[in-house]
Amino acid sequence: MASSIGSLLSGALLAAAGIASAHPPTPPEFGPNVLVFDPTMPVAEIKAKVDTIASQQLSNEFGPQRYALLFKPGTYGSAAAPLNFQVGYYTAVAGLGRSPTDVVINGSVNVYNRCRNGSCIALDNFWRSLSNLTINVTDPVGAGCYAGNFWAVSQAAPMRRVNITGGNLTLMDYCTGPSFASGGFIADSQAGLVINGSQQQFLVRDSSIGTWTNGVWNQVFSGVVGAPGPCFPAQSSCGGPYTTLATSPLSREAPYLYLDERGAYRVFVPAVRRNASGTSWGGGPTQGRSIPLHDFFVARPGDDAHEIDRALARGKHLLFTPGIYAVDRTIRVRRADTVVLGLGLPSLVPQDGVIAMTVADVPNVGLAGLVFDAGPVNSPLLLQVGTRHAHKSDRDEPTTLHDVFFRIGGPAAGSATVSLEVNSDNVILDDIWAWRADHGNGVGWTVNPADTGVIVNGDDVTAYGLFVEHYQKYNAIWNGNDGRVVFFQNEMPYDPPSQAAWMAAPGVYGWAALKLTDRVRRFQGYGMGSYSFFNQGLDIYASNAFEVPATLAPGSLNNLLTIFLDPGTGRGGILNVINGTGGPSTIANPDVPVTVLSYP
């Protein structure tokens, strides 16, 4: 009894003196779908667990399972026994170090082609992520063609804060043809040789690379040390097509979970960078602020939206653990500096037509790693950032959205008029995919209706990696001034039932992929593509891929392209790249980019 009292007194004295207790903190309850690995665990044990998850997830494109695989600081695997595994749908793999070099995997973390009905491609390898660790590429015995680290993905599969050493990073799977991949995102990462291969379009931001092998349609580099020089369209003299910006004018890295020196969980929020080039961590620790996890409300599937909303009102940050969340009342982010972080790509599904989430006109809010799925009753919006016409913000502390994805249909029939509306000024959009589903469940012109993917009303909004696809009217509408888009990817809707059903105005065929309204006086765009694949067996046309005011300054938009896809079943096409300029992409020139270098 005396020794127990003595221990308590010693603990109290240590606490009063500000000295941390020797006992490690109690780990949080993240639930069964967050697996935390320790470097003392045998490689065979880790591999058995991650392989079991991968075997479930590789075919889980529209399924309910969600996982986060977290690695504590230390080294995993060795030359003799490397740790090599695959990443399936809705699986987030992340290190728990303060720096990417704190977690080292001797092995590889891979995404390969998905093979179905004798066809092997990566075009549907969506909704997964890799972040905050070092991969010292170490091939297993008998790797054969699969030597290196393969990350053969398309949209919604970001790689962040990853350090690739000892081998190649490959963005396609050339071991099982035809190897097509379409639309990836890398930020704050470092690699030597990057094999782009058949990767049709890609954005790399604030990173460092040794060699980038080639381009296909639209490769964009912003603030990337070692990036290839500008070369657009593709030319024999310089390769390409490459759009290269020496620096990123305004950027910020995504918040991430990590363990501090005591083993306590915290969330780090990186600081804003201006005119950035290279990684945020290569020259020393990333600058920013750290938040203890006890300041977060840790949400689990089944939690009441009212309870989540009350926690935010009390000043809590919010962490969603993996799962699907039915949102029957709007989750409102009211306070400045709030962080909303998703683990394992959690899905928020509004019920009864509510708006799933709103963010007030307050500075320095950060949202990351979230999927918004339209519900069965039409919602006017899925996510609203700021209130209309308010124009409140702080240019030094912008609100940021990282890896935030929207779906209309796919898992099930759903509807939302607009997916994302940005009203606040000085917002950074960093890897956004708004997708009206072209395949999956609940897909059809009247089954998963949606007008517009993204509307930007705020001024000084910057977007890196804006993917907006298949919406039935303007895919994206930009009303704010001094906006900036670095890399835009669009596919027009596949399924208009007739030309008459898809007319923006008399004499105007279809709807442009991106519409800058007459309110816009200043705008900058770099590396922007729109593709057509009208698959209803009818000649469907769009007059323009891009529509902008004639009063914009010369050179406001740079390196634009359109492409006609799949001459086997596609019909119609896009008649002009921008404002009647550029000429058509139709069956007469399939799979060949039609380009405009600068407009006006």
Image: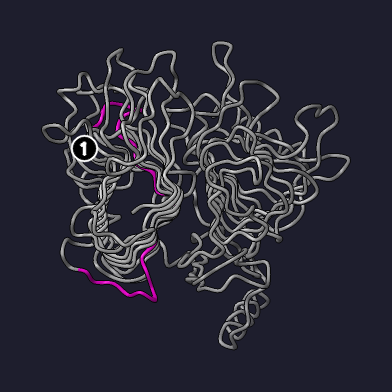
Number of numbered labels in the structure image: 1
Q: Residue at x 49, y 52 (%)?
A: 29
- Location of residue 494 by image quarter: top left
**Where 351 sits versus 441, above or below?**
below
Q: Closest to the observer: 49 or 545?
A: 545
- Location of residue 569 by image quarter: top left
Q: Residue at x 52, y 31 (%)?
A: 125
Q: Closest to the observer: 389 or 353?
A: 389
Q: Residue furthest bottom?
A: 17
Read off the residue under disc 1: 451
Q: Residue at x 65, y 80 (%)?
A: 6
Residue 350 visible from this viewpoint: no
Q: Secondary structure at mark 1?
A: loop
Q: Quadrant of the N terminus?
A: bottom right
The amino acid type, in three-letter code, at marker 1 is Asp
- Find the magenta span and give its range: 391-414
Residue 423 visible from this viewpoint: yes
Residue 349's spot in the image, x, y percent? 29, 39
Q: Closest to the observer: 17 or 361?
A: 361
Residue 393 magenta-highlighted = yes
**Where 27 sits versus 116, above or below?**
below
Residue 267 magenta-highlighted = no
- Location of residue 241 by image quarter: top right
Residue 434's spot in the image, x, y percent? 35, 41
Residue 560's spot in the image, x, y percent? 42, 45
Q: Main secondary structure of the magenta part?
A: loop
**Where 334 sits versus 589, above or below?**
below
